Amino acid sequence: MKLSYYKQIIEKYRQIKKRDCFAELSASFPDVPLGTLISIVAQEHQRKVKKTYYFHAAPHKIADYYQRYLQKVEKSKRGCGFLLQIADEVDLSPALMAKLILDHHYNTILVQNSKEDNKVAESISKVKISELLRNTFLIQDKQLAAEVRMCILADRFYGSISDVIRNCIGQEHEIKLKEELTQLGFSFLDENQLRDKGYDKTPDIKLDIPIVVDGHIINWIESKASFGDEERHKEYLRDQYWSYCNRFGPGLVIYWSGYIEELNNCKEQGIVISDSIPTNITCMNPDILIKKTYAEKVL
C-alpha cells in the first residue's frame, strides 16, 4: 500500500468519529481487506489513546464522568450502557472509561468509609482494579458491574479481551509461518529454541540454511500479525530488527496485514519486508559446496 493511500484511510477514519466505522471504511476502500482496515484503525486508535489519556484521566474530568454516569442511572433506574454512551460522547476508549470510573468509584467509597471511621483514606491498588476488570462479577455494585462488562465487550482495541484476541492472532500467524516453512522443506529454529541456546533478542524463525529472495539473503524471519505503518515499523527497527541483523545477518519481516510500500527501503542494509512468505525463493544447493570441498582436497 502506498503511503498516500494509507493517509487517505486514516483521514477517513478520523472523519467518521465513531467506534463502528468499518462498514463506511470498507465502502470507501473496497480494495483493502477488512483485516487490514482493522489493523490500521487499531494502531491509530492506540496512538490516540496515548495522546489523550492524560486529558481524560485528570481528576476533575473523571469526577465529571462519574457524576454524569450517576445522573443517567438515577434517571433511568433499569437501563444499562450509560458508561458506553459517555465514552462515545467524549471519544474515549470504552474499556479505559470503565477502568477510570471503576477506580474512582472504589476510591470514593474508601474515602467515605475512612471519614466514618476517622481513618486516613487508602487508595485501591492497581492490582485490585485489574482483577475486577478481568472478572466483573467481583464488583459489588451490580449496575456498575454490568456497565463495566459492557464497555469491555464493546472495545475492540483496548482492554483485557482485545489483548487476548491480539495475542491469539499473533500466535496463529506464527504457527502458520512454521507450517508453511515446514511444507517448503526448510529447517529452522523457533524463538523458544533460540532462547534455550542463550540468545536474548530473537526473531520468530532462524533458518538453518539461508535462502535468497529477489537477490537478498535471508537468515531469519519475523512474523507480525499487524499492518506495517511508519511509526510501528520505526519502533521495531530500533528495538528488534537491527539487533537481529547484528546477530544473525540479513532477514525478512512479514507484516501479514500489509505494509506501507515506501518502508521497504532497507533491503541493502539487511531487512526485507513482505506481507506473506515469498514464492520466488532460491535455495542454496549443498551439493555445490560438497563438490567444491572434494575438488580442493584432490588438488
Image: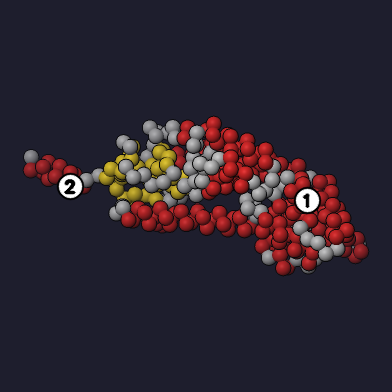
Instruction: Identify the residue at horizontal 51%, vertical 41% (top origin).
Output: 31
Q: Amino acid at mark 1?
A: Ile
Q: Secondary structure at mark 2?
A: helix
Q: Position of residue 135 (x, y in %)?
A: 68, 65
> Is residue 70 rendered to the left or right of residue 269?
right
Quick one: label 1, few (<14), some, or many (20+) residues within 10 Å? Answer: some
Q: Is residue 299 above or below residue 144?
A: above
Q: Are marks 2 and 1 in contact (CB under 8 Å)?
A: no
Q: Name the N-terminal-most of marks 2 and 1.
A: 1
Identify the image quadrant of residue 232. top right
Q: Is residue 6 left or right of residue 80?
A: left
Looking at the image, which residue sits at the far left? 298
Image quarter in which the C terminus is found:
top left
Q: In front here: 267 or 17?
A: 17
- Percent from the top left, x then y, of residue 166? 55, 54
Crowd rating for badge 2 (residues with CA inside 10 Å; few <14, some 14–19, many 20+): few
Q: Where does label 2 land, which residue?
A: 287
The residue that disc 1 covers is 86
- The residue tagged with tag 1: helix, strand or loop? helix
Q: Position of residue 56 (x, y in %)?
A: 76, 45
> What kind of colouring is applied to the model shown?
secondary structure
Say which residue appears at 58% left-offset and 58% top-offset. 164
The three-letter amino acid code for the residue at tag 2 is Asp
What is the CA distance from the residue labelled 2 to the residue labelled 1? 68 Å
Residue at x-position 61% and y-position 55%: 162
Residue lying at 39% horizontally and 36% vertically, measured from the top left: 270
The part of the image, by quadrant, that contains residue 143 is: bottom right
Above or below, 211 against 69 in this view is: above
* Rendered location of residue 298, percent (x, y): 7, 43
